[in-house]
Amino acid sequence: MPPARRAAIGSVAQNGITSFIQWYQDPSSQPWVAADVFGSAPRELLRSISLQETLQLIQVVVEMVEDRVVAEHPDLTESVLRYSRDIAFSAADVYAKAAEARGLWDARLEALVVDSIISGETSQEISSRVAALGWRSDGQVAVLLGIANPTPDPDAMRKISRKAGSDLLLGIQGRRQVVVIGLMTVSEKPDQAIQQIATQLEGYFGQGPLILGTTVATVSDAPKSARSALAAHSVAVSIGAVKRPLAADELLPERALAGDSLARQTLIETYYLPLAKSSPELLGTLRAYLECGRSLETTAKSLFVHANTVRYRLKRVYEEISADPTVARTAFVLQVALILGAINDNEFGLKR
């Protein structure tokens, strides 16, 4: 043990004995144990000496007093027991107050981190703050956003998260509740793993849309996930009843129409560019099919080909971008993507 720490412990023990003598001389007085005994101890001692070690120290001092003092003066037995009880409770009170202050500080820091993620601050600031909170996640991260429950239960949410192998950051901003979900280890199927955790947390949110943001690699990239969740939450009302939780990427066209540049870029890169670069013929067929109201015959006539040719090309479109144009919702997504792609090409002076 370093000399400074030994000296501090010795000072605490000496103060305890002196305070006991003063109290014993005047039994009517109330001993201010916390102030008299622990008041002179430096704050660093609280961080380096645990509550268990403090109680062991008290036990050693009391045993020493009993061996050397009470043995010669049995009438001091009751007083020593009473005072040692007060000392033990005072020590516990000191540590309890410190733990409470630490808990309040952690809660404020957690709220600050969540606010930083929502407001899109730099990744360096987020990384340093979550490290101070003891963030243990090394895997992928996503933001879950919805209406706050009237009776929030953060402890239950953290328990669910731990059992599922993840870490959480929780924040309530007015009526909105934000949960940052981080997997403990890197997953090969992060979207599926995080979706399962979000589903278990669904009951701890209030009524209304519950949006799961885009999965990102680390917590420093969480602002990107939060941005997608916020954009999706603002347009979720446009599609009526939705499942809970709903992935933000399932609302890409609505987000793009509302001015979300991230959704616009995602649509272009996911659906438009692969077709434009690999097969302009497929792109033209898909555009004609969507403009003709998804009618094979009408599309075939407009392109002067057989309906089976259109059907074959649509199958190739599905193989190329994993999206089936014959499904109504998918057709809407693709139509928005093609419009945005054409606009994007025109902005850069390109013609396809």
Image (cartoon, rainbow, N blue to C red):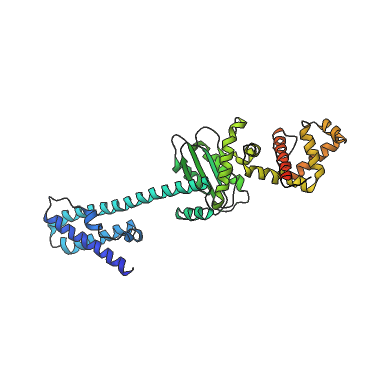
Residue depicted at 24% across the width and 64% down the height = 11
Asked whether residue 35 is in view, the answer is yes
Check the image and report above or below for 343 versus 84.
Answer: above
Asked whether residue 162 is in view, the answer is no
Left or right: where 200 falls relative to 284: left
Point out residue 211 in the picture as x, y percentages from the top left corner.
57, 39
Check the image and report above or below for 78 versus 254.
Answer: below
Total number of numbered discs in the rendering: 0
Locate the C terminus by quadrant: top right
Residue positioned most to the bottom: 3
Residue 281 found in image quarter = top right
Point out residue 119 in the picture as x, y percentages from the top left corner.
52, 46
Residue 290 found in image quarter = top right
Point out residue 89 in the picture as x, y percentages from the top left corner.
26, 51
Left or right: where 1 falls relative to 81: right
In the image, 295 versus 304, the foreground residue is: 304
In the image, 314 versus 112, the foreground residue is: 112
Point out residue 130 in the picture as x, y percentages from the top left corner.
48, 53
Left or right: where 158 falls relative to 301: left
Residue depicted at 52% across the width and 50% down the height = 121
Locate the N terminus by quadrant: bottom left
Residue depicted at 57% across the width and 36% down the height = 234
In the image, 176 versus 203, the foreground residue is: 176
